[in-house]
Image (cartoon, rainbow, N blue to C red):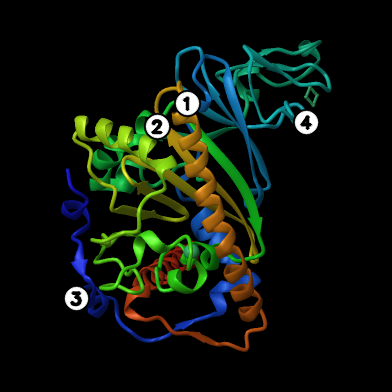
Amino acid sequence: MNIQQNFKMLPTEEAAKLRGRGPVSSKPYYDPEWWELERKAIFMRSWLHVGHLCEIPDAGSFIRRDIGFARASLLIVRGKDGEVRTFHNACTHRGTQLTQESCGKQSKFSCPYHMWTFGTDGSLLSAPDFERFYVAREDVGLRQVATEVLAGMIFINFDPEPKQSVREFFGPLVDQMETLPVARATSFTEWNYEIEANWKTNFDNFQENYHLRFIHPRTGQQTIGEDNPFGYPTHYGFLGPHRSQTLWSNPDPPPIPPSLLMGYGKAAQLAAKDGVSFEKTDFKLFPCLHIVGLPPAQQFTHTMMPLGPGRTRGQVRMYWTGEADRASRAYTREFGAMTIRDVLSEDRFAVESGQRGLNSGAIEQIHLQDHEMLLRHLYETVQDKVAEYLAEQEAG
Ligand code: FES
Ligand SMILES: [Fe+2]
């Protein structure tokens, strides 16, 4: 299946006309009160990507995720029945965190304070001297957070009753997401960073190519050419709150370093065998997940979770299928991951500097050119979600 069928990809001119061309307000990019609205309207009730199935392969495998904007620590656990569940890492006796480990494998979770012990399904298995409590055992299971898996990726939703399932949320994209390499990944290389920037300021940096030739004069070579000196995408697509772009192919790219050729060549063969062809696909999934198919058939995800109005935590992963069973493959993987890290380090300065410039409020409006239309779409989507939330509050 091709991304263009789902996203109604349009050439730049046509898409830009549809999106409009006026300036947008800068306030949502720095204002703490606006952020509080986004927190409630978006982050406390949207499906958020927090992990991958390959991190919890066995019964009892778990990962811990601390989600700053929700002041929550979560345990994402594979149960004995194979189900993936998410619990608050908080004992239902008096709240003590059950574990400080970031991941592990265990058949039960015992609270260090008074030894209440919970199963991998969250039920209370035992509690010392429980006869002296006046509560039913069934009522003190671990507090659960809605969890669904799609394309190998684990999504959670803090809304106790999400309005949509994750499949409904991604709609026609579901089939395509399930064909992505990330769906079959068995391992990944990851790094995490924190940045002094609003989550949208940071996300926007990865939604436009306008900056490539200035910020990435060296690392951006593959995507810039004589016919397209800014490396602009050729098409843009919109599907509800989600966005996509089709990247341009440089017909005469500079040579790929020999060190990468071997690994990429192998990956290309595997991709061709699977009928996978989406290296030009670039998904920006609401609210803060970015999935890029790298050349060829390599998946790179980037999640940008807000920590507050002016601080964001990013998680970047390159997903792999199968073992790095040869030195050449191991080297290629490391090289690929480090290349992306270099590019992102170049972006960091521009993003933080951009945020510092906005923080005073002196720049009241942001001007977006046609090739920044994905930024406009995120801005508008956020406006809509907040308006929807406020209307709901008003209606009681
Ligand atoms: S707080 Fe966990 S057993 Fe008391
Ligand atoms: Fe960049």
Q: Earlier in the sequence, mark 2 or mark 1?
A: 1
**Mark 1, mark 4: which one is toward the viewer?**
1
Structural distance between the alpha carbons of marks 4 and 2: 31 Å
**Mark 3 / mark 4, whichever is N-terminal:** 3
Q: Label 3, label 2: how many angstroms apart (C-alpha)? A: 35 Å
Q: CA distance from mark 3 to mark 4?
A: 55 Å
Q: Residue at x 45, y 13 (%)?
A: 81
Q: Nearer the viewer, mark 3 or mark 4?
A: 3
The crowd level at tag 1 (other Cα within 10 Å; few <14, some 14-19, many 20+) is some
Which residue is under mark 3? 14
Find out whether the residues at labels 2 and 1 contact each other: C-beta distance under 8 Å: yes
Q: Residue at x 50, y 51 (%)?
A: 340
Q: Is residue 154 visible?
A: no
Q: Earlier in the sequence, mark 1 or mark 3?
A: 3
Q: Residues within 10 Å of mark 2 (few under 14, many from 20)?
A: many
Between marks 1 and 3, how big is the CA–CA gap? 41 Å
Q: Which residue is mark 2?
A: 152
Query: Which residue bears the numbered disc 4?
Result: 96
Assign a secondary structure to mark 4.
loop
Task: Tell me the quarter of the picture where residue 191 sits.
Answer: top right
Q: Quadrant of ligand 1?
A: top right
Residue at which label 1 appears: 54
Side of 14 relative to 345 (left or right): left
The three-letter amino acid code for the residue at tag 1 is: Cys
Give the spatial CA distance, label 2 vs label 1: 8 Å
User: Which percent across, then down, holds residue 136?
Assistant: 65, 18
- The answer to whether residue 198 shows anywhere in this view is yes
**Label 4 CB, ligand 1: below 8 Å?**
yes
Q: Are marks 1 and 4 in contact (CB under 8 Å)?
A: no
Q: Secondary structure at mark 1?
A: helix
